[in-house]
Amino acid sequence: MSTAHGIDRTDGPDGAAVRVFDCAIVGGGPAGLSAAVNLARMRRSVLVIDDRDGRSLWSQINRNYLGFPDGIPAAEIRLQGRRQANRYGARFLLGRVTAADRDGELFRLLVEGDVTGGAGIDAAGTNVNVARDEELGRSLGEVQARASEEVRARSVVLATGVRDPFPKFEGRDECVGRSLFWCIACDGYESADKSVAVVGHTEEAVEMALDLLEFTNRITIAAGRPGGFSVPESRLADLAANGIAAYRWRVASYPNENGQIQALILDDPKKTRIPVEMVFTVHTPTARNEIARQLGVNLNRLGQIIVDTEQHTNVHGVYAAGDATSVHDHQVSAAVHEGNQAACAANYYLYRPVQKAPNQEEC
């Protein structure tokens, strides 16, 4: 029987020892760490596998998370969550899960150790936050996966998050969470009385621009693409009637300094310059669902992992939490809640039959 401090082992096909955990958690953001804390507190052996390439490594400050009246950076929540999970015995493996299947009663995960997290324009996070996370990882005994390493687990929590197709420009990484945002529920309050631009061409972008009127009347919207807006002219009239200037042009550049976007330069004949203090981009994040697909987990039409209110997927022993799920709330508080729910469901799954109500496999 395994505990949070003891790991069962089995022999792999080549005779080498293979790690077996009660639960493998794929993703080390707020959802995955919440699951790790709660499962480890139930004396389960827990391995958090993370590639250091997620939203929690940007610079946004969460000001709507209960208990932090002055706000707390998402990267700090991540650091504190890692310390907390480690205190109860959770272990950390730096790597990217590239393949997964079920092998009898165990799930088998193949982890690649060649992780560049934080490097390059398409990776999430700033160099500063990634470096702090690396330093903490070393102090917590985080292990770098080998070139190809197998992990086996009795249950799996998928907290794989999303990829955000932010606009690409020099200095962008420092702007995300400081002057470049994506969630009005998280950061709309901070736009009060500021010059704000929305970049997007869909109805969702129009709605965001109109919703921002609750905070400021200095709002501009730019389609952000050559084809202009994909909404009826009546919606553009709604914008005009509410004092919101709409530009049908692509954004050519985002002049910025020290994380502060100063203006939008449009790709129109005049190269119109729109001074801004905050920019909200409207885009469809891509759920990181590759492992879910390999495990046979059901996805919705957007590729998000379908879960119930207790974070069960359709595959027994597999749970999901956070932005990769169909709930997709974007809120740190929601991710933490879902991670806790997933932990409770996984813990019940791991009970022996005598510990469960008759004829009931999961709660």
Image: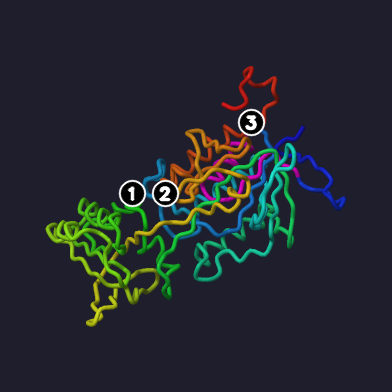
Quadrant of residue 85 within the rendered picture? top right
Observer-side mark, 3 or 1, equals: 3
Q: Which residue is mark 1?
A: 185
What residue occupies the far right of the structure in this picture?
15
Do tag 1 and tag 2 residues touch (Cβ < 8 Å)?
yes
Q: Is residue 277 left or right of residue 320?
A: left
Residue at point 40% right, 51% down? 62
Asked which secondary structure carries label 3, the reply is helix
Residue at point 25% right, 80% down? 271
Give the CA separation, mark 2 to mark 3: 27 Å
Q: Earlier in the sequence, mark 2 or mark 3?
A: 2
Q: Amino acid at mark 2?
A: His
Q: Position of residue 333 (x, y in %)?
A: 43, 43
Q: Is residue 92 left or right of residue 177?
A: right
Q: Earlier in the sequence, mark 1 or mark 2?
A: 1
Observer-side mark, 2 or 3, equals: 3
Camera-side residue of 314 and 77: 314
Asked which secondary structure carries label 2, the reply is loop
Q: Amino acid at mark 3?
A: Tyr
Give the CA separation, mark 3 to mark 1: 34 Å
Q: Earlier in the sequence, mark 3 or mark 1?
A: 1
Q: Quadrant of the N terminus?
A: top right
Q: Which residues are magenta?
A: 20-42
Packing grade of label 3 (10 A; few <14, some 14-19, many >=20) is: many
Q: Position of residue 273 (x, y in %)?
A: 24, 76
Packing grade of label 1 (10 A; few <14, some 14-19, many >=20) is: few
Q: Position of residue 214 (x, y in %)?
A: 21, 50
Q: Which residue is mark 3?
A: 349
Q: Which mark is residue 330?
A: 2
Q: Does the image show residue 339? A: yes
Q: Quadrant of the C terminus?
A: top right
